[in-house]
Image: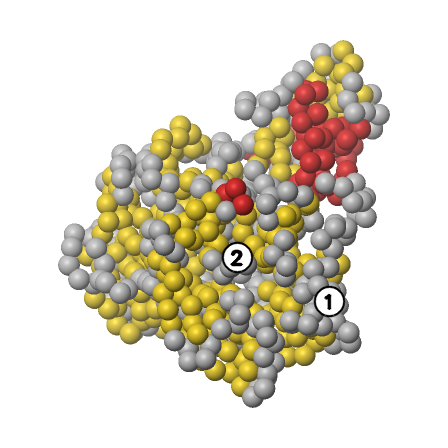
Amino acid sequence: MATSPSCSVRARFAQYEVDLSSGDLRRSGVPVRIQEQPLQVLRLLVEAGGRIVTREQLRAALWPEDTFVDFEHGVNTAVKKLRQTLGDSVEAPQFIETLPKFGYRFMAPVTWVPDGAHSSSPLPMPVPRPNPTDTGWDRKTQVAVALAIVIVSGAVILTYFWARPPVVPTASHYLQLTHDGHAKWLVATDGSRIYLGLGSYGLQSIAEISVGGGEPKAIPTPPATNMVPLDLSPDGSQLLVVNGQGGPFHGQFWSLPVLGGGPHRLGDTEGRAGSWSPDGKLLAYSTGSDLFLAKADGAEGRKLAAMKFATNIDFITWSVDGSRLRFQARERFTDPPMLWEVSTKDGEPHRLIPGWNSLPDGECCGEWTADGRYFVFSSRQQIWAIPRKDNFLHPNPKPIQLTASPMSLTSPMPSKDGKKLFVVGQTYRGELTQYEPKSGQFLPFLGGISAEYVDFSKDGQWVAYVSYPEGILWRGKVDGSERLQLTYLPGYSLMPRWSPDGKQIVFFETRADKAARIYEVSPEGGTPRQLMPDDPSQQFDPNWSPDGSKIVFGGAGGDPASTVRVLDLTTRQVSTLAGSHGFFSPRWSPNGRYLVAMTVDSATLYLWDFQTEKWTDMGSVGGCPSWSKDGQYVYVFGANATGAVLRIRVSDHKVERVADLKAFRGTGHYGDGCLALAPDDSLLLLRDAGTQDVYSLDWKAP
């Protein structure tokens, strides 16, 4: 048996052997020169035993915590030098596999060599076998020896099967099925067709394609609705849909015939996510953090389980035998979404793979294979499978990585015949555009850079923005010159705002497993400074008061505990606006008299008057409020199914349609992105220049 890393500092892989203590690297016995940082990267990768080493782990190992360097460039350089030393390549890796945006994994088998050993496979010592015919042994001794041999042999056999690497399923040979590049997700398949959800800016639609590929064909839905597809009935005749409103959306459940005809309500059920049972007799659905079971037509609903925290349950799926439900939910608003499981009889929900993942994208969108042997899901922008728990030698199977694509892969769905795996492959890229009212067109702005959350200095000479999808804060002149990077990964920077005097920029930053934090940074660079390091709550959407003495901010969207708070920069005291419980996304008016905020479901806009100290309902909206420069209007996305940018006059709440978005494909960190206003109040939106298409992979399982 090979020695573990804890007992040895020498490792062999392919034709290489490395002494991790001395740094001696040899290729077929010939010394190979390796620099210190590439050696540290190699040490982390081989010691990880085939697991992913994140970019954050590499950063922490290569540089002290207080080091201020471009970590992203430094990590890339160290990995590149290691590849050059080993003769490896990015395109056809033999040793180092890249997991886009997350980290790296060592692909080659590693043998650990005991100190002083000259062979990576020491010969096992033979076990002496007494001769049971020896006249010195009595009958009891012979029986005892025979029994010992049986026990030892059984232990050896069990150890062999326990230690033997499991035979794993594979997914290979990508075949692109769609070529439109539009936003989409997979809903279900009946064996000959794949049903898709399409859409952006609250305008969802339903389509189908052949399992062999082709352009999506629309399935009609009633006008003035926002029918979001969730599931397909076991007989393939009905789609389960929700007329989703707000954000996160919530609405009535309907069934929609796939071959035409009007939808009909499923009783009085309302919620967010849902799925029919494999036998077609039951409906599982969620409302917020509660999980319900009802008859397939929505009748006789009852609560099955409740999460112990405020969250949204999404992507509900049944096990093949109908005994379990799996779904996605967050344990806290600071956590990434994870997969959970609960019995359909009773019991508390529990994490499906506890302790496995803490990366920002979490775990999502799982489905069982048709035979019920594997559960496939997406995480770390790739597709994974976890075997069914039916082997006493491996009672807690670990996820198996199926793909290592340069694309981000999501929405896995096994075929009915068990031979294919359908996925959505996505590339991330945007183009910043400016709306031209006369032509109704969106034209490139700032050279069409891939950036969002654009904000301008008061004099209109400088601009701050966040690069997409990297999440790095930059500033520069409006002509594109004098660009300067202000933040670095692993944090994701959002919503920068210039101070009225142009001397500071505030923004908030998100990281995995941490609450969002508000920072300020000089436009000339330097280390960003936390404004409220001792405040444990979520800190989103910072905005300056017009005189620069205060900052208003809120909590996270979807968090019912969110309130609108104000930080006094002189006294460092934080106060809460009266009546703001359940509000977020505040924006201070240019004249300082008002601010606007939204309900946490992103459905309603409210106006706060500092003179009367009262809130006023300004109507249904879809998010991202922005004040006009004169303070007379608030620009917002329209509510779901509107597909437009609106502006609301403060004096009388009159609503005007500014731009139609039905033909505009937006993108951004939060789905469809967020609108911004140029110094002349023209609209700025990030157009989706990436791709999302359906792919088919060959699925083979042992």
Other residues around mark 1 within 10 Å, as few (<14) / some (14–19) / many (≥20)? some
Looking at the rendered structure, the secondary structure element under dot 1 is: loop
Instruction: Note whether 67 is above or below 249 in the view shown.
Output: above
Instruction: Note whether 487 is above or below 75 in the view shown.
Output: below
Q: Which circle marks residue 549 in the picture?
A: none
Instruction: Note whether 694 is above or below 11 in the view shown.
Output: below
- The residue mark sitting in front, 2 or 1, is 2
Q: Of the residues under marks 2 and 1, which one precedes in the sequence? A: 1
Can see residue 644? yes
Residue type indicated by callout 2: Ala
Q: Which circle marks residue 532 in the picture?
A: 1
At 33% from the left and 55% from the top, the residue drawn is 662
Residue assigned mark 2: 678
Residue extending farthest right: 22
Query: On the picture, is 608 further left or further right than 419?
Result: right
Q: Nearer the viewer, residue 114 or 81?
A: 81
At 59% from the left and 64% from the top, the residue drawn is 541
State the quadrant of the N terminus.
top right
From mark 2 to mark 1, how far is it between C-alphas? 30 Å
At 79% from the left and 40% from the top, the residue drawn is 63
Residue 134, position in %: x, y? 68, 21
State the quadrant of the C terminus.
top left
Q: How is the image coloured?
A: secondary structure
The answer to the question of whether label 2 and label 1 lie on touching residues, with beta carbons closer than 8 A, is no
Can see residue 474? no
Residue 668, position in %: x, y? 50, 51
Q: Nearer the viewer, residue 434 or 31?
A: 434
Residue 48, position in %: x, y? 67, 36
Instruction: Note whether 467 is above or below 13 in the view shown.
Output: below
Residue type indicated by callout 1: Met
Other residues around mark 2 within 10 Å, as few (<14) / some (14–19) / many (≥20)? some
